Amino acid sequence: MLPIFMRASLGLVAVGLAGAAAAQEAAPAGHAIAPGATAAPRPQLGRAEAMLVLDYQLVRVPQEASLDLLGIHALSQLNDWLYGGVGVHAPLLEGEYGGFMMFDVTVHAQRRLWRNLFANAGVSMGGGGGGKSKEQSRVLTGGGGFTKGYVGLGYEFEGFAVGANVTRLKFYRSIIDSTQINVFVQVPFSTTVGSYASAGQRLPATDAQDAFADSSENTLTLGLDNLAQIDPQGSNHATVRLIDLQFAHYLNRNAYWYASLGVGYHGMPLYNQLIGGLGIRYRISPRVDLHAQLGLGSGGWSPDRIDTGSGLLVYPKASAEYWIGRNWGLSLSAGYLFAPTGSSKNATFGAALNYHLQPEGRGARESSGGSLLEGYRINLFQQTALDVRDRDVEHGRINMLSAQFDTVVSDHVYIAVQGAVAYEAYRSYPGYGELVAGVGLQSKADKDSAFQFFAQVLGGTNAHGAVVKAGVGMNLGLNDRLALYAAAGRTVAAPSNKTNFKSDNLALGLTYRFSLPGR
C-alpha cells in the first residue's frame, strides 16, 4: 500500500586525481575526500507517485436486494499514464450482505484530455464472497472469482479528483453479472524513495532533511483485536478474535487517515472487517502517545451468524502507544464496534505492534547523523495450495491471489505480512482466505548477483482458524526495483486449531523493491 515505483540510480565516484576532483565536487559540505581515497556511493533519492481511489456502485442482483459496494484501491504510478495496485470492495447499506468482501489486483490507465478533464479505464481481477448465509454466498458469487472492467471521465481539483465510470462486474458461474455507474474520488500522494541497492546506506543530515521536508509519516500496525459480543442475536455468541492490519498516513504532525483490515482467527474464523477513518495523536511524553480514531466500514461473516445487517460498521477507538525504539511502538486499545443496520454490538480490546515509516519528530529527524535508508519489498504472486486436508479429509487444491509486504530489518532479517484470497471455490463455497505475519531470514543482497534467497515462518489465520506457514524461496533480480518471486512451503494448523489443517504451497510472481529514509 505504499507507493513503490520510481527511477533511481547510484552515483559512482572514480579514483585517481581526476576522479578525486570530481568526487570532491559531489561531496557534501564539510566532508572533503582525501587525495587517492574513494568516496562511498552517495544514495540518490527520487519521488514515487501514487493515489488512493474511493468508489461507490450499486450492483443489481436478480431476485435479491441490490448490492452496494464501497471500493478502496491503492495504485502506484508506473509511467505517465499507467497505474497498478490492489484493492478491496465491501457493502454498506443495501440488503443483508454483512461480511461480503472482494479483493483484487487492478491495472488502471489515465490520460488528461483538456485542462483538468481526464479519461480513465481499468481492469480488476480477484476473488471474494459472502451473503446472508453460506448457501446464498455460493449463489451470489459462484466459485468466488470475478472480473471488473470500467471506463469513464474525471475532473481534477487541487489535491483531489472526482468522476464517474461505466463499470461491468461479473462473478464466474454466478447470478452477479451487472453493468452500472460508479462514482469515484482520487487522492494523490507521493513520498521520497531510494533504490533497493541503497538500503542500509546512510543519508547525510542535509539530504535527510530535504527528503523529509515534503514527506509525511506513515505507520504500519499489526494487532490482535477482540470483539466481545453484547447481547448477540446471531447464532454465534463467541468472542471473536482478530488479526488486524492497519496503514495510517499523516496529514500533518498529529492528524491522519487510516485503513485497516481485520480477519478472525478464533471464535469465528474468517470473520472480516474493513474500516477506514480519521485519527488524531496526542503526545504525552517523549515515549508515550495517545490516539483517538473514528472509523466507518463494513464487515461480518453472514447475518445469520453475526448480525451486521447490510454490513455497515461504526468504530470509535482509543489507544495508548509506548515507543520502544525510533521506529517501533507497542500499543493497547479499547473501543466500541456496532452495526447500525443490524443488531451486532461489541466491546473491543487489543494490543498491537506499530512500525513508523519516516517517523515525524523522532529518530532520524532529530539526529544530526542523518537517516538510514531502509529496504522494503512488495510481492504479488499466484499461490497454489496442494494436497489440502482438514480433519483428515482431502480437498484437492486452492488457487489464490496473494500479496506480501516485507520490511528489511537488517542484511539478513526481515518482517513479513502476507494476505491471500481464493478465486475458486473451496469445499464448494467461495471466500477462502489467509492473513499471516512473521519473520524471515535472507541472504545479503549483492549487486554482483541477481539471486537473493530467503526462508520465513509466518503465523495467522485461514478459514479453519490459527495456522503456521513456513517456506523457502528466492528473488531473481531483473533490475534494481523488479525481481521474479518463487517460493515453496507448507501450512499447518496451530496447536490450538483442532481441524488438523495442512497443505503444501507453491508460489510464483513479481517483487517490487525500494528503500525509504527511516531511522
Image (cartoon, helix red, strand yellow):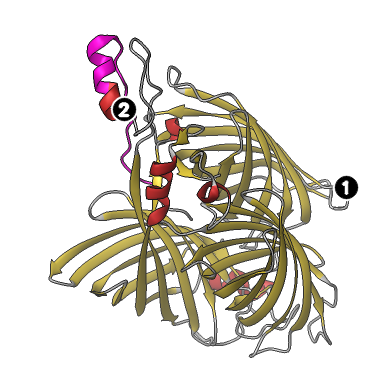
Marker disc for residue 228: none
Please determine whether, in this image, residue 445 is positioned above or below residue 128.
above
Marks 1 and 2, Cα distance to the nearest angstrom?
52 Å
Q: Amino acid at mark 1?
A: Pro
Counting from the top left corner in percent of width and height, residue 451 is at 49, 23
Counting from the top left corner in percent of width and height, residue 130 is at 61, 71
| Residue highlighted by disc 1 | 495
What residue lies at 77% left-to-right and 75% top-to-bottom? 348
Say whether residue 32 is magenta: no
Tell whether 349 sits left or right of 399.
Answer: right
Disc with the residue nearer the chain's start (1 vs 2): 2
| Residue highlighted by disc 2 | 11
Q: Which structural element holds mark 1? A: loop
Instruction: Report the label total.
Output: 2
Give the main secondary structure of the magenta stretch: loop
Residue 425 seen in the figure: no
Q: Residues within 10 Å of mark 2 (few under 14, many from 20)?
A: few
What residue lies at 34% left-to-right and 34% top-to-bottom? 29
Please determine whether, in this image, residue 450 is positioned above or below residue 163.
above
Question: What residue span does the magenta drawing correspond to?
Answer: 5-22
Q: Residues within 10 Å of mark 1 (few under 14, many from 20)?
A: few
